Image (spheres, helix red, strand yellow):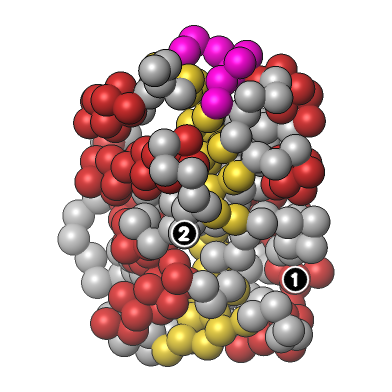
Amino acid sequence: MARPRVHVTAPVPAEVETALARDFELVAGPEGADGIVAMLTTRVDAAYLDAAGPSLRVVANYAVGVNNVDVGEAARRGVVVTNTPDVLTRATAELAVGLMLALLRRITEGDRFVRRRGEWEFSLEFMLGASLHRKRLLIVGPGRIGRETARLAEAFGARSAFAGRGDDLGRLLPGAEIVSIHVPLTQDTRRLIDARALAAMPASGVLVNTARGPIVDERALVDALRAGVIAGAALDVFEREPEVEAGLLELENVVLTPHLGSATRETRVAMGMLCVEALRAVLVEGRRPANAVG
């Protein structure tokens, strides 16, 4: 009996590839595939689904967010879409708190200073930063990652508040010394953090985004940072990723990382195994997996 055909849109960890090869025939392109393992950089829209053809039954997205997949169009064609919840929660939350500390304590700024051989000697007033202790942290999007970020930040003494879908973000921003973004990218959240939202934050406030880049208007952010509207920003994701708004690269009060939220080997392997399990559920066992979306 022929094994189900699966296309993987980008290289995956060896452990995941081995697990896939046990049950599936791995094919070079989506045409005629029964299943797709899609990276977040792959746009699975109507054209892509057309190219895959009518044999396609499942798209296993190698991410929690599914903004790169037209879930509605997939559903209309009877294609199950899955994601990778839970397994990357801790890793992403750790990075979010790490970015807060790097920004507040000027860690990466200090690293750049030392590497360019800036002149310095120990001084009580040199390169002073701020503590996470007792900072008012606003979590925008109190899902799994948002709640875990709050828990970890509270271990440093931060005081957390949450902004959910029904909350008035504009009302909560003025009291937030740190704003950490954890909402999915949707039409409602695209450029949620714009010039108006940034202006609502205190001048001492900082912004952290480990969710999706287009949630923040990067040009408005550059303008706000240059004008002192807010004090700093730390971004792991970008509006036109992998392109970065040029102005951000020129500012010292900005920390930038290349989409490392889930970037531990254990996490990336666990994400892949969830994709494998989803493919097995649909293509081998004939059932809807628990991590199906839409």
Image coords of residue 40 (percent x, y): 55, 37
Residue 99 left/right relative to 221:
left
Which residue type does callout 1 highlight?
Ala
Residue 154 left/right relative to 242:
left
Q: Residue furthest left?
A: 122
| Residue 294 visible | yes
> For the residue carrying disc 2, how many other residues have a C-alpha within 10 Å: few (<14), some (14-19), or many (20+)?
few
How far is the residue under mark 2 from the one under mark 1?
36 Å
Q: Dot 1 corresponds to which residue?
A: 197
Precedes in sequence: disc 2 or disc 1: 1
Q: Residue furthest top?
A: 28
Residue at screen point 61% across, 16% down: 32
Image coords of residue 171 (percent x, y): 74, 88
Which residue type does callout 2 highlight?
Ala
Q: Is residue 19 magenta?
A: no
Q: Which residue occupies the foreground of this view, 49 or 268?
A: 49
Image coords of residue 15 (percent x, y): 22, 31
Query: Which segment is the magenta one?
Result: 27-34
Q: Which residue occupies the foreground of this view, 177 or 149?
A: 149
Image coords of residue 57 (percent x, y): 60, 34
SS of the residue under disc 1: helix
For the stretch drawn in magenta, the main secondary structure is loop
Residue at screen point 38% across, 73% down: 148
Split into 4 quadrants, where in the image is the N terminus?
A: top left
Vertical comparison of 287 with 78: above or below:
below
Q: Dot 2 corresponds to which residue?
A: 290
> For the residue carrying disc 1, how many other residues have a C-alpha within 10 Å: few (<14), some (14-19), or many (20+)?
some
| Residue 231 visible | no
Q: Which residue occupies the foreground of this view, 185 or 270?
A: 270
Q: Are circles 2 and 1 on residues that touch, CB within 8 Å?
A: no
